[in-house]
Image (tube, rainbow, N blue to C red):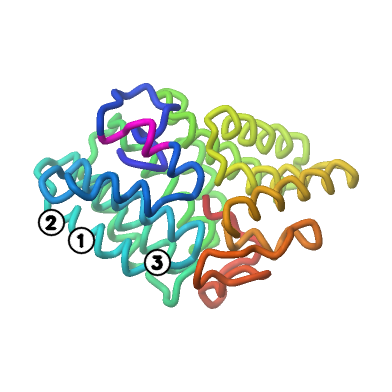
Amino acid sequence: MPPHGGGLHPGTAGHLDEITSGTVWRLRSRACWQEAAELLTPTADRDPRAALCRAELLIEQCLFTADHWEEAEAALRLAEAGVTSTEQRAAAACARGFLAYLGSVLGPRDRLDEAQAALGRTSALLPPHAAGRPLLDFRRGLVAENLLRDQTAAWIAYRRAHDGALAHGDTLLASSTWRHLAALALAGGDRVRAREGFAASLRLREELGFMVGVAPALAALAEVSEPDEAQQLRAEAGRLVQSLGGVPVWLVGRLGDTAPPPSGPPGAPLGAPPRARPGAPRGRRTN
């Protein structure tokens, strides 16, 4: 599977080739999704794997910027048109479900039905122990938590995703499952377990060098830290957000005075989270 679990970063056990090169990872991890996608553009028309990777990169850009929806949609349509195997069809459907989910939470309209249908297709296409299952489970957890408001279903999905990520050596996905399981623990009043999960998520992202994901991990850990430490963590997160051009945009408003005003990217909301889908929970975690 492409980004957000399996193959496009050095934390997986899978084979790395010219598509999943270190250059693509380094650009992606520093919020340079456009540049990373351009490296894959010459082969995307003839190589379904490159097209899928490129689409996932641009969908991830939507996650962190709450913008660039049309680019991601065009890249995903290209990937969907070029698939040649059941595995690739499953990957495209999983990406479609994630884009619809993000559109519901951060974008202009509710796409819950589309997200559920696409993730359902993914499940039907994947064998029970397929490498793409952990990513599917994680994305189903996001839908359950943030759109369906079902924390029990979310916890079950995140737990399956977490176990699968560890089994497949997907360190980046594990950093996200740690974070979401910790958030549910915190919601249930278990600050000890929450701190353990947030700290593990931060450690994994720092070890991978996934810089664009470090600031959210710092902010999450601050939620369960003593006031002095929390202030330091938020200040560090603010400096990272500024250095990366103001992403993730939905984090800026939660860092308070510790986050300097971002300078970009063009079109991104400044100083406040983007408008959410009506009724979406405040303080939600999307990655």
Q: Residues within 10 Å of mark 1 (few under 14, many from 20)?
A: some
Tell which circle, 3 or 1, labels the residue nearer the N-terminal end: 3
Q: Is residue 75 left or right of residue 148?
A: left
What residue do we see at 41% from left, 33% from top? 9
Q: Residues at badges 2 and 1 in contact (C-beta under 8 Å)? A: yes
Q: Amino acid at mark 1?
A: Arg
Q: CA distance from mark 2 to mark 1?
A: 6 Å
What residue do we see at 57% from left, 34% from top? 205
Rendered image: mark on residue 261: none
Residue 88: image location, x then y, percent: 19, 43
- Quarter of the image for residue 242 reads bottom right
Mark 1: secondary structure: helix
Of 45 and 272, which appears nearest the observer? 45
Q: Amino acid at mark 2?
A: Ala
Residue tagged 1: 77
Of 189 and 281, which appears nearest the observer? 281
Residue tagged 3: 68
Q: Residues within 10 Å of mark 2 (few under 14, many from 20)?
A: few
Residue tagged 2: 81
The total of numbered circles placed on residues is: 3
> Magenta stretch containing residue 35, yes or no?
no
Residue 184: image location, x then y, percent: 64, 47
Residue 227: image location, x then y, percent: 89, 47
Q: Residues within 10 Å of mark 3 (few under 14, many from 20)?
A: some
The magenta region covers 19-25
Residue 184 at least partly seen: no
Can you tell which of label 2 and label 3 is closer to the viewer?
3
Q: CA distance from mark 2 to mark 3?
A: 21 Å
Q: Is residue 279 left or right of residue 167?
A: right
Can you tell which of label 3 and label 1 is closer to the viewer?
3
Q: Quadrant of the N terminus?
A: top left
